[in-house]
Image (cartoon, grey):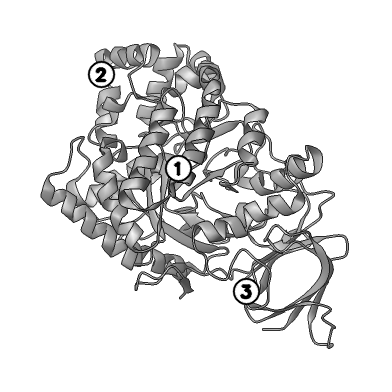
Amino acid sequence: MKKKLIRGGLVVDGTGRKGFKANVLVEGNRIAEIGEVMASGDEDIVDAAGLVVAPGFIDTHSHSDLKILEDPEVRPKVIQGITTEILGQDGISMAPLPAEYISPWRKNLAGLDGDSDGIDWNYRDTAGYLKSIEAVRPGPNECYLVPHGNIRMEAMGLENRQPTEKELQKMIEITRREMENGAIGLSTGLIYMPCAYADTSEIIEMCKVVAEFGGRFVIHQRSEADTIVSSMEEVIQIGRESGVKIHYSHFKVCGRKNWDKIGDMIRLLEEAEKEGIDVSFDQYPYVAGSTMLGVILPPWVHDGGTDKVIERLRDKELRKKMIHDIEHGIPGWDNFIDFAGLDQIFITSVKTEKNQDAVGLSLIELGKLRGMDPYNATFDLLMEEENAVGMVDFYGTEDHVRTFLKRPEMNACTDGLLGGKPHPRVYGAFPRILGKYVREDKALTLEEAVFKMTKKPAETFNLAGRGELKAGACADITIFNPDTVIDRGTFTDPAQYPAGIEYVMVNGEYEVRKGVHTGVRNGAVLRKKASGAVELSVK
């Protein structure tokens, strides 16, 4: 591997300290030297004058779990400067997956991560899944959180009930096994099935195992709307009683009537930190979110898995009950239609050709297209697509984005679903922070923003040797133009690569040169050591 010299750039090293002019020498997959390094004549030289040389960006909430096996370059991520992703989010992902659950689980997963007949689903556990990623040679580095829903499914199926003592013990054993298999933590999504069936005590027992390994508990909490304060209190209780480090996914508050809760949310963060609980969160820089459309259905509709959802959607009387529950609410349930509105939820992906005409429409527009009320039009769509429908929903304001962006607990993420007509964050979350919130709004300094994209997430998830430019560190490097970097995607035309990301290096090889993907894939799978040590090893 030829030495590489990055010459004349402004080094923003990820620590938060002020940028400085220097050359960066890369040998193999490591940074050899930073300073007044002179060319010897045999290096691959990049002239970085006028550009910022930063550590590669780390996406702590990614949904490339299936995509990485089908399309391992993951260009929407790499071309925006991301060199490491954390998979296994929201408590439902690829592994563990016992053979007898492959069919129902694929249906449950489809709305988030898609589905495919083109991969081998018989990998069984985290070890097998990570080997599958290695076999395709990924573009970015990949880490994995073991998902609560997969663990629960393996231990007790998809039923809406509490585990027996024996089943809970099995969940604890599976958590330990998957941490030993290389997972860096545990995730849950308490609005998704079967995670939502769990009580707090179940999660605490699993998190005790994660804490033993120095891992982190990553949570889509029970509510990001009406009951967000009590929801946050539950998460803090989990951290307190298990000793685990906690990380809130895509931190926000949804719905105009809940915007006054932001002060209480910040107070809870600060009180937890004073208590000694390790708290962090990630955030994408947009006022709209994205998830599977099935979350608009009341929780009881999901009991038993996707096949039961489809069965209930066929029942006209049960549809009436669904509409009643949506319009009147259920205590403790995050009602997306209530806080976003039928006119502010848009369909982003479907799996069949028949319903492609629905992509890009709001639920109101879908009803008009189908000549019926928006509820039944949406129920028909979910039924026909077997719940494999993605959506975007609008819920907040730019002031909220800036408020959370400035918090010390915050690091950046995409949380992007890669199918259909995606949320623009899939292509542009990190450049948007640098262009809009640094250059235009001056909400953050350049150095603060780079820290939140690199060293902050590396420290949060114990990614040894990454997130900082220094001699001996892994050579994950993103070079961008601070005067032009910006996202280009919009909600109507999201699949656009950003401007200003000039070079991206992963483990010492350029995967992007002059803004163009090179076709190189040099990522690695990063595993936590089986000994329980916090340091991650590349295998």
Give the residue at mark 1.
Answer: 272
Is 396 drawn above or below residue 135 in the view shown? above
Label 3 sits on residue:
473
Left or right of 435? Residue 411 is: left
Q: Position of residue 30 (x, y in %)?
A: 64, 78
Quarter of the figure with residue 486: top right
In the image, 290 versus 91, the foreground residue is 91
Q: Residues within 10 Å of mark 2 (few under 14, many from 20)?
A: few
| SS at mark 2 in the image | loop
- Asked if disc 1 and disc 3 are in contact, CB closer than 8 Å, the reply is no
Q: Where 387 sits versus 529, above or below? A: above
Write the residue at 70% across / 43% down. Answer: 432
User: Foreground: 400 or 9?
Assistant: 400
SS of the residue at dot 1? helix
Q: Position of residue 359 (x, y in %)?
A: 54, 30
Q: Residue at x 16, y 43 (%)?
A: 163
| Quarter placement of the C terminus | bottom left
Q: Which mark is residue 315?
A: 2
Left or right for 330, reference 459 = left
Q: Is residue 125 visible?
A: no
Mark 2 is on which residue type?
Asp
Q: Nearer the viewer, mark 1 or mark 2?
A: 1
Q: Residue at x 34, y 67 (%)?
A: 127
Identified at 50% across, 17% down, the residue is 342
